[in-house]
Image (tube, grey):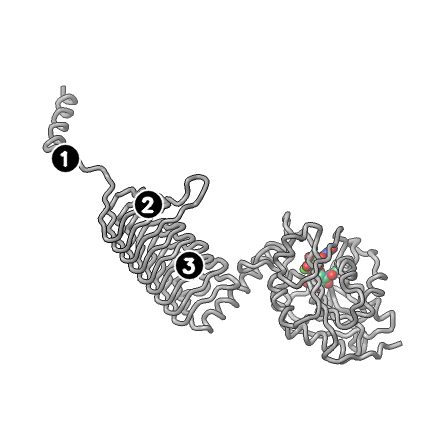
């Protein structure tokens, strides 16, 4: 009996994301989908893609310690817990209670594949409906199929079954068409089919890949969506694949940054995060690393070997070389942050400068203030963090230690080498250092005395 049910594009859509695997091959204590690519957990990439489909429901299957996965998936997601990791079909079984009463398309995807395109997912659901199939599976006829499930088709091009790499006969191993790990299933029939999956296979696991054969046995059509680009379906099973995926993702992000108008002098040495934004005509030198949460305005220059995370850089600013901007750094328009300057949770006003060797933490630096070489904000007393306020146009000389909480008024001067422990009024001069003692001729006399003793 063939399944003749058809549905239209308004069919309700539920997405199930399999994310409970520990990733044995990762040799990790963390769930695999929490390993990061371009600063974002693997699963976050897929979640963003799924949200563009506006599904009626998203169910994420996580392991028993699901708290971290919950925060990585974002809002509006049902977390289903798979208590024992007994395979991909068992993971889908764990999602079934969350799908109770749902009838429509169920898209099943793996949380370890970050490049999957929304268009592919939509095409997969369409293929199932258009062919009147009970299940449609995405397959790839590109790249190296080893390690993946092989698609065994019947003479009419429908899917007979999927055979896992470890269960393949030598002839089946030669099949080039491999399982991308994406499935569109008739929601009304999913539960019944899942219940019939056993674990008599090489790994003793409940394989989701047994679903097409069971559906076919039930008289349902089993469609295939053939995809040409293996890169889109690259999954992460090992640390080496994690590094490969990172490499491809960086390439993609660099390309996007350049397309948006930023110059990357040597793109392959610049590392971006998933959410890095760089304004037009900004120039990024070689070996610059962007952690998450960085927004760079237009016409900014970032010189080589700078490390930036959680920071906002306003237009026309100049950063580096060798600068470090940490979370909460906000560099104002046209401000300069030079070599070996570290800024954390601090604002540099417009046109302010800290050109060399400084630590600015928990501070507010006024517009056009000058921070000399070696200036340190002593923001931490071993228990709490304290604020340093430097007024607009203030001049803080070299090697000044600012013991927070402390404020230096607008236009004030702080003499080099001072340790400042109390507030300085606007336009004042403060010098807090020992006065030099000069003893004329002392050195000569000393040398002569020492010289005589050596000679005798
Ligand atoms: C799976 C497919 C394979 C396909 C490949 C595509 C199976 C049996 N095999 O293999 O045919 O070619 O994906 O990338 O499905 N997971 C759970 N609970 C479990 C086991 C796994 O939630 O008990 C999750 C994992 O976190 C992962 C996904 O399911 O996100 C896939 O599991 P994985 O072990 O990576 O399967 P593959 O060996 O890659
Ligand atoms: Ca995988």
Q: Is residue 10 above or below residue 195?
A: below
Q: Secondary structure at mark 2?
A: strand
Q: Is residue 111 above or below residue 402?
A: below
First of labels 2, 3 by sequence position: 3
First of labels 3, 1 by sequence position: 3
Q: Quadrant of residue 108?
A: bottom right
Pick whichever, 78 or 430, lies toward us.
430
Q: Secondary structure at mark 3?
A: loop
Q: Which residue is mark 3?
A: 287
Q: Is residue 175 visible?
A: yes
Tell me whether the residue at label 2 lies in contact with that at label 3, contact meaning CB atoms closer than 8 angstroms: no
Pick whichever, 423 or 220, lies toward us.
423
Q: Which residue is mark 1?
A: 438
Q: Does residue 326 appear to the left or right of 62 in the view shown?
A: left
Q: Quadrant of residue 217?
A: bottom right
Q: Does residue 448 appear to the left or right of 244 in the view shown?
A: left
At 46% from the left and 57% from the top, the residue drawn is 309
Residue 402, labelled with which disc?
Answer: 2
> Which of labels 2 and 3 is toward the front?
2
């Amino acid at each position: 009996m063939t399944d003749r049910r058809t549905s239209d594009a308004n069919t309700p859509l539920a997405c199930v994301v399999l994310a409970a695997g520990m990733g044995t091959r990762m040799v990790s204590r963390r769930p695999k989908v929490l390993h990061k690519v371009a600063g974002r957990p693997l699963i976050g990439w897929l979640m963003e893609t799924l949200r563009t489909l506006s599904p009626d429901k998203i169910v994420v299957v996580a392991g028993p310690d699901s708290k971290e996965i919950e925060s990585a998936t974002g809002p509006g997601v049902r977390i289903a817990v798979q208590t024992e990791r007994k395979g991909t079909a068992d993971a889908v079984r764990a999602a079934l209670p969350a799908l109770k009463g749902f009838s429509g398309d169920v898209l099943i995807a793996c949380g370890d594949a970050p490049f999957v395109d929304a268009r592919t997912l939509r095409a997969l659901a369409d293929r199932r409906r258009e062919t009147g199939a009970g299940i449609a599976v995405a397959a790839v006829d590109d790249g190296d199929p080893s390690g993946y499930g092989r698609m065994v088709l019947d003479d009419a091009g429908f899917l007979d079954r999927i055979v896992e790499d470890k269960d393949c006969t030598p002839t089946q191993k030669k099949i080039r068409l491999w399982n991308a790990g994406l499935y569109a299933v008739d929601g009304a029939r999913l539960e019944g089919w899942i219940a019939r999956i056993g674990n008599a296979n090489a790994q003793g696991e409940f394989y989701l890949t047994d679903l097409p054969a069971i559906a076919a046995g039930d008289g349902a059509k089993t469609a295939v969506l053939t995809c040409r680009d293996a890169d889109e379906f690259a999954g992460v099973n090992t640390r080496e694949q994690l590094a490969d995926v990172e490499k491809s993702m960086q390439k993609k992000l660099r390309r996007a940054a350049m397309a948006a108008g930023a110059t990357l002098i040597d793109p392959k040495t610049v590392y971006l995060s998933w959410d890095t934004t760089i304004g037009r005509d900004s120039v990024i030198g070689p070996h610059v690393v962007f952690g998450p949460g960085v927004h760079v305005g237009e016409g900014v220059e970032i010189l080589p070997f700078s490390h930036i995370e959680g920071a906002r850089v306003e237009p026309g600013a100049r950063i580096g070389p060798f600068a470090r901007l940490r979370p909460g750094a906000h560099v104002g328009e046209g401000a300069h942050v030079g070599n070996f300057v570290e800024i954390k949770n601090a604002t540099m006003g417009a046109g302010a400068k800290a050109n060399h060797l400084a630590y600015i933490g928990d501070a507010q630096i006024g517009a056009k203030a000058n921070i000399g070489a070696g200036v340190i904000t002593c923001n931490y007393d071993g228990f709490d963090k304290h604020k340093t306020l430097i007024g607009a146009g203030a001049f803080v000389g070299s090697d000044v230690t600012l013991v927070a909480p402390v404020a230096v008024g607008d236009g004030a001067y702080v003499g080099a080498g001072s340790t400042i422990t109390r507030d300085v009024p606007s336009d004042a001069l403060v010098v807090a250092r020992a006065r030099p003692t000069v003893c004329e001729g002392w050195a000569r006399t000393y040398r002569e005395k020492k010289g005589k003793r050596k000679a005798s």
